[in-house]
Structure formats: C-alpha cells, structure tokens
Image: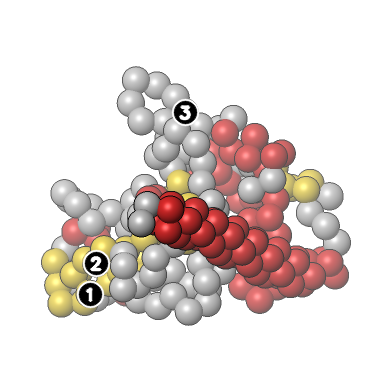
Amino acid sequence: MDTTLGTLVEVTQGLGTGGRSSGARPGAWTLSVVDSTDIQGDQLVGGPGAWRTVAVAQTAWTEKQLLRPYDLLVTSRSQSVKLALVPPNVTRTVAAATLLVVRTPDPGSGLAHYLWYYLTSKRGRAELEGRITRGMTIPTLSARALAEVPVPLPPARELAGFARLVEASDAAYRAALDAARIRHDTIRDAVIGRVAANAR
C-alpha cells in the first residue's frame, strides 16, 4: 500500500536560534544542537558532549522542539539529502534549522526504523532528491515537499521487525568498519615497523 509521508508522521523544521527566530530568545536552559554536519553515512556522529550548545529560554514551545527517541532527521539545505535516526539515549537536544524532524506517533512501532530504511534506499533517496528546490541559492527541501514523498508501506504486523532489522544492520555495519580500521592499522604498523628495522 502506498501513501504519503505526511499522512503517517509530523514533519517540522528544526529550531532556529539566530536573528528573530523563535528559538533565539536567550535564557538559562542549555541544550545540545544537532547540525547537518553531525550526520555522516546516514548516522548521527559525535554526541551531546561533542555537539554545539545553545542557551535559550525554557518555554512550552522550546520543550516541544526537544528531539525524541527515533525521530528521523533529514537535511533540508544541502546538495544531497542525509538522514539519521535519533538514538534513544539522546536528551536535551534539538535539531538545527538546517534539519527537518520527522516524528512518528508511536516511536516503538517500528515505523520510524522502516522510514529510515526506505528513505535511505536508492528508491527513497531518489524521491527525496527529486523534491529539492534548486535555484540561485542553497538547494532546499521544504517540510511540505518532504511530507508529499510517497511511501510504500508493508503490513502493520511487519513493522516491528524493521526495528530489529535496522539495529542488526547498523551493528553489522559498525563491526565491519571497526574490522576494516583494525586491518588498516595493523598493516600500517607492520609496514612502518619493517621500514624502521631495515633502516637501522
């Protein structure tokens, strides 16, 4: 069954903290801010200790902007679209205005994981790229355009399985990267060790 993203989720712009934006009101509430540059390989990198911070007034509106577990982040101002799922351990963090936040009604349903899986696929990414407005300025993907992206849905009973599939896939991906890094370092150290031994 096909539907549009906007019928399944809430799509909002990240928190603007500059100029006359609503989040620019200074205060004593310190929050971490996730920027577009914090998404690499369709994963969030760094963490609350590494991300930039902003001090704003704590209001009902700013509290609503806090990221929740398994919110989906989509870059709105970039040459190519990047996506990331918010991990469950992220707290007191907001998305920057350069990001769109996709929030599902039930984070535990598996829908967020499925949407990340679909939108990072070749087909899903093509749908996103096709909705980018390219003019004289920075390419832009609006919240409205994102909400109009068609999404093929699996049966509801299969959604929960996508959470396990994505987590297993992510764990395998990270393990492969770690193994490649270890091989790289081992070979490098062996080569340098041999050169150093021959130079004596």
The residue located at (48%, 79%) in the rendering is: 89
**Quick one: quadrant of the C terminus?**
bottom left
Q: Residues within 10 Å of mark 1 (few under 14, many from 20)?
A: some
Task: Confirm or deny contact between disc 3 and disc 1 (CB under 8 A).
Answer: no
Q: Are marks 3 and 2 in contact (CB under 8 Å)?
A: no
Q: Is residue 115 above or below residue 110?
A: above
- Circle 3 SS class: loop
- Which sits earlier in the primary sequence, circle 3 or circle 2? 2
The residue beneath circle 2 is: 53
Is 12 left, or right, of 153 in this rendering?
Answer: left
CA distance separating discs 3 and 1: 34 Å
The type of residue carrying mark 3 is: Thr
Give the number of the disc on residue 133: 3
Q: CA distance from mark 3 to mark 2?
A: 30 Å
The kind of residue on which mark 2 rests is: Thr
- Farthest-out residue, top: 136
Whichever of callouts 1 and 2 sits on the residue coming sooner in the sequence is 1
Between marks 1 and 2 in the image, the one whose residue lies nearer the viewer:
2
Residue 92 in picture, x, y percent from top left = 35, 76
Q: Please tell me how crowded label 2 is: few (under 14), some (14-19), or many (20+) other residues with Cα within 10 Å.
A: some
Asked if one can make out residue 2 in the rendered structure from this viewpoint, the answer is yes
Which numbered mark, 3 or 1, is in the foreground of this view? 1
Q: Residues within 10 Å of mark 3 (few under 14, many from 20)?
A: some
Q: Is residue 181 left or right of residue 59?
A: right
Q: Which residue is mark 1?
A: 30
Do the numbered discs 1 and 2 sit on residues whose CB atoms are within 8 Å? yes
Tell me the kind of residue under disc 1: Thr
- Is 92 or 149 nearer to us in this picture? 92
